[in-house]
Every structure is written in structure tokens, then in C-alpha cells.
Amino acid sequence: MSASALTALTAALAVMTGVSATPQPVTVTARVETPAVYDDEAGGNADADDPAVWVDPERPGRSLVIGTLKEGGLDVYGLDGRRLQHIAAPQAPGEDAAPGRFNNVDVVHGFELNGRRTDLALVSDRGRDRIRAYAIDPAAVAAGRPPLRDVTAAGVAPVFAADETEVDEQRTAYGLAAYADDGDAYVVVSQRERTRLRLLELEDRNGRVGYRLKDTLDLPDTFTLPNGTSWKPCADPGELPQVEGMAVDQEEHVLYAAQEAVGLWRVDLDEAEFEQPRLLDKVREYGTPWTYDTAEEECVLDTAHDPGFGGDRLSADAEGVTVYHAADGEGYVLASSQGDDTFAVYERQGGNAYLGSFAIGDGPATDGVQHSDGSTVVNVPLGRSFPQGALITHDGEATPADGDREGTNFKFTPWESVAGAFPEPLTVDTGSFDPRDTD
């Protein structure tokens, strides 16, 4: 059955039954993938997680994909998926201290550093609770040299921890999203195993990048259900429902944040402050009773007594979030539904209406995408390989496997493949938004 016929059938069923029907996800395939990495000693404890894209101002076909590998550090790739540079995470400062662990990455273009407009890759170092900054050198890209250089200011403070003892407890910097506003640059950072978000402003400290705190927001950890009962999301003892996947609408200055066991939040950013958060969509498991199995050290959902207060588009965990910008406020917010290996698509404007979902399946060039954490979408042309933009996604189950080793990597999918797969095609707009325009 065609996608359009299926959509019509589900709509008809909804009318007959009075129940809202959700269309089945459409399927697309990726065109390029990066080399698989492995989270073991032989693989340098590398575990791919979150990507960002740097757009080359002279030759977009030379643009870079930058991906975090957690304890394995950071990799830089060309648009053909080939690894161009590897950056190791910082070593542990002491015998009992945690080493660096790069969790999320984002890019800001044109930050004024030492009197020059400089493009930066910003990384949340979960291991050391810092934000690391790397200058991106277009001349090095053109010459085929390693393009990233560490420009983090010496002595930057932990983002959440009060001291180094708290750093080693690992309730540290986790998710990260960056944006620019009138020449200033900011990062929103989430805290591991907590609901807290912090907004930091970048600073030039004698030609190096530091940051200072602008605002703090605590999302809820307990929710009142429609039947009047109180519910806490499923979590290990002592943990609260954390946020990882985040993205900022660069034109409207709206933060979209995925609270993994809860759903997708919208938070306006006004004058470098968080406004009141609004829960856009809930995960399917929202409101479901649960118990904790101490022997297995895991939560057990009591699905037989699910009261039906959850959504029907996101399966926990809600993960990677990215924004596709188009003209006149049009465009999309994409969120990874990790529990069912799909991506939900919402309108960028108005009330963020849900439009449908898609999956990235096995294709002639790559395998499909499962358990996806981070993602990023670019609307502008990226050379001959991606002339109408691209969606870059983490793949938590890269195949074929190397024996018993479980691999991860990143997949590159043409945006027009995603847009054209929907019964009513999504917008392809390569000209109205320039990610390098930070003013």
C-alpha cells in the first residue's frame, strides 16, 4: 500500500472509531556513513553520539561533520564519511578522577575571538563538567590539514559542579545546543541525571574561549496526571529525568529540549533568559506505573495498567533534536524517538503541529539507523553530494558487526529524500536561511 493510501485509511478509521490515528512512519535511506567505532579498549572506548555540521563559506562541498565519541573524544569527517581528524578527550587529572568524555557538539559561526570572526565547535565534556571550544580553520580545510584547534580558556569552571569532588560524582554537563544573537554566542547545557538546564554566554578571554552563567531552569521531575494522581518517570534510584537532545531555532530563539522519559519541551529564550517551558509532546510511556527491579538494576513498566495519558509519536527515550529552517517561519522540528527507531516531525511555526514520522532503513549504500541519539539538519546546499541539504544522524547499531563488538557511527541522508518520502512532501528551502548569518 502506498504512503498516501495508508494515510487515507488511517484517517478513515479515525472518523469511524472516533480515535485519533497516527500515520505509519515512512522510510528513507542514507547515502553515506562514517567508519564504525567501538566502545572497547581496542577501539579506544569510542561510542558515537552526537553530530554537528560546519558549513564551508567558500566551497560548501568541503563542509565538515563533527561527531562526539564520548570517552573516545571527537572525530571530524568529510561529506564522503572519511575521517579527517581525531581529537582525544582530556586525560583524567588524577588517579581517582574521571577522564574527559565528549557527549554533545554544536557549531557557532563568526564568534569574535582575538579580534577575528572565528567559527567554533563547542563540546560538552561530561567527564570533566566543562565546555570545550575548538576553532575551525577554513584555510586548513582547503589545504587538507587537521582543521580543529583547541581554544578553550585555561581554568574554565565546571558548568554544574561546585568543586572537583562533585565533578567526579558525574552529575555533569550532558546535552548541548548553541546559538548566536547580535554577535553574542550562547550555549544551553543540560545536567546528567538531573532536570537542570543552564544558559552560558561565551567570552573572549585573551584569545581563548571561556563562558559565564546567564540563567538556570529546572524542568519538572514530578507530574500531575489528568486523573489527579502524581507520577514520576521511571529512573534508577537517585536519578531524575534528564535532558540530552536539544536544539535552538536560530531565528526565533526557541529552545527545543527532549526530556528522555517525559517528552519534548519548548522554551522561549528572551534577552538571554529562559521563559516558561511548555510540554509539546509526551512519550508513549508518560504516566505509566513502574517498579524498580533491584536484581536486574532496571525499571519495569507496568504496561498492563497504562492509564493512556502518554503520546503516540515518541517512544522513550526522546533523544536527538534538530531544527530545519525555512522562509517565513516555516520549517520543522525533528526529534528522535529512540524506543522505536523513528524520527517525529513537527511544524516549526504556530503550535508545532505534528506532521508525521520517518525511519532510516537499510539501503544500497548503508544499513539503517537504530537507537539514534544525536542528529542535525542543514538546509543549505553541501556540494554535489548533498545539493539540497542533509540530515546527519547517530546510528547506535552500525552493521555489519565486528564479531561480538557492537559498533556505532553516523549516517548522512539527503534532505530531499526525507522531504519527498511524506505523502504531502516537506519543504525543501535552500536559500532563505543561512546558518552562517549570526547577526
Image (cartoon, rainbow, N blue to C red):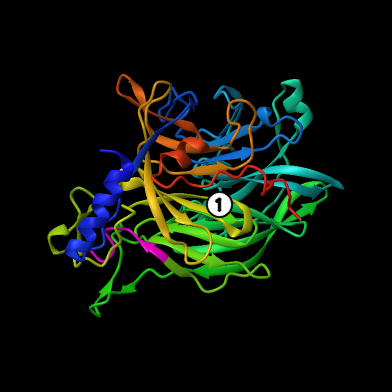
Q: Position of residue 133 (x, y in %)?
A: 67, 44
Residue in the image at 76% along x and 21% along y = 143
Quarter occupied by the N terminus: top left
Q: Position of residue 372 (x, y in %)?
A: 40, 41
**Considering only vertical position in the picture, is 395 above or below 435?**
above
**Considering only vertical position in the picture, is 84 above or below 265?**
above
Q: Nearer the viewer, residue 332 or 366?
A: 332
Q: Position of residue 354 (x, y in %)?
A: 40, 58
**Considering only vertical position in the picture, is 51 above or below 325?**
above
**In the image, residue 121 lies in the stretch drawn in magenta:** no
Q: Quadrant of residue 81?
A: top right
From the viewer's perspective, tell me whether residue 397 is left or right of residue 64.
left
Q: Nearer the viewer, residue 157 or 95?
A: 157
Residue extending furthest toward the bottom: 228
From the viewer's perspective, tell me whether residue 22 is left or right of residue 62.
left
Q: Position of residue 370 (x, y in %)?
A: 35, 37
Amino acid type of the residue that numbered disc 1 sits on in the rendered structure: Leu
For mark 1, give the secondary structure: strand
From the viewer's perspective, tell me whether residue 326 is left or right of residue 172.
right
Span shown in magenta: 280-288
From the viewer's perspective, tell me whether residue 343 is left or right of residue 58.
left
Q: Quadrant of residue 268?
A: bottom right
Q: Nearer the viewer, residue 202 or 239?
A: 202
Chief SS of the magenta region: loop
* Residue 129 can be seen in this image: no
**In the image, residue 281 lies in the stretch drawn in magenta:** yes
Residue linked to disc 1: 176
